[in-house]
Amino acid sequence: MRELFLMFSTIFIAELGDKTQLATMLFAAERKFPPVLVFAASAGALVIGAALAVLVGATAGRYLQSMPLRPIAGLGFIAIGLWILVQHFWAA
């Protein structure tokens, strides 16, 4: 149960303020569709996206067991953050 809570809380915090949430809020704010329909579409998309991520991760995990994935992922996030900062401060 602890592992489930850890996975849930990590993913929940990572998704806060994500582009997916912003897009969902915009669809709901437009009031073109009932909120329950926006929720159903958003939830379905997230479930399918998560299923694909698990499938790819489980498959890749078989082939990448000897690679240090956490440091590689961390460096990737740092690189993306630096790129965003460069774009913000130095792009015209």
Image: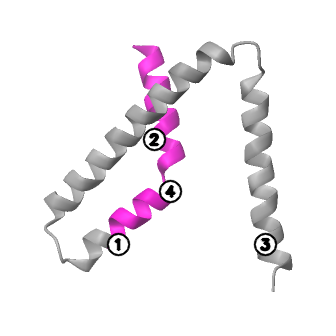
Q: Main secondary structure of the magenta part?
A: helix
Q: Is residue 88 left or right of residue 31?
A: right
Residue tagged 4: 18
Are the residues tagged 4 and 3 within 8 Å (C-beta)? no
Residue type for callout 1? Leu
Depth check: 16 or 83 in front? 83
Crowding near pointer 4: few (<14 within 10 Å), some, many (20+)? few
Q: Which quarter of the figure is the C terminus placed in?
A: bottom right
Q: CA distance from mark 4 to mark 3?
A: 19 Å
Q: Earlier in the sequence, mark 4 or mark 3?
A: 4
Residue tagged 1: 26
Q: Quadrant of residue 37?
A: bottom left
Extreme right residue here? 90
Residue at 45% across / 15% down in the picture? 2
37 w.r.t. 87: above or below: above
Q: Position of residue 26 (x, y in %)?
A: 35, 72
Q: Earlier in the sequence, mark 3 or mark 2?
A: 2
Residue type for callout 3? Gln
Q: Position of residue 73 (x, y in %)?
A: 72, 36
Residue type for callout 4? Asp
Depth check: 10 or 26 in front? 26
Residue type for callout 2? Phe
Check disc 3 and report its element: helix, strand or loop: helix
Q: Nearer the viewer, mark 3 or mark 2?
A: 3
Are the residues tagged 3 and 1 within 8 Å (C-beta)? no
Residue tagged 3: 87
82 w.r.t. 6: above or below: below
Q: Earlier in the sequence, mark 2 or mark 4?
A: 2
Q: Earlier in the sequence, mark 4 or mark 1?
A: 4
Q: Nearer the viewer, mark 1 or mark 2?
A: 1
Start-end of magenta stretch: 1-26
Residue tagged 2: 12
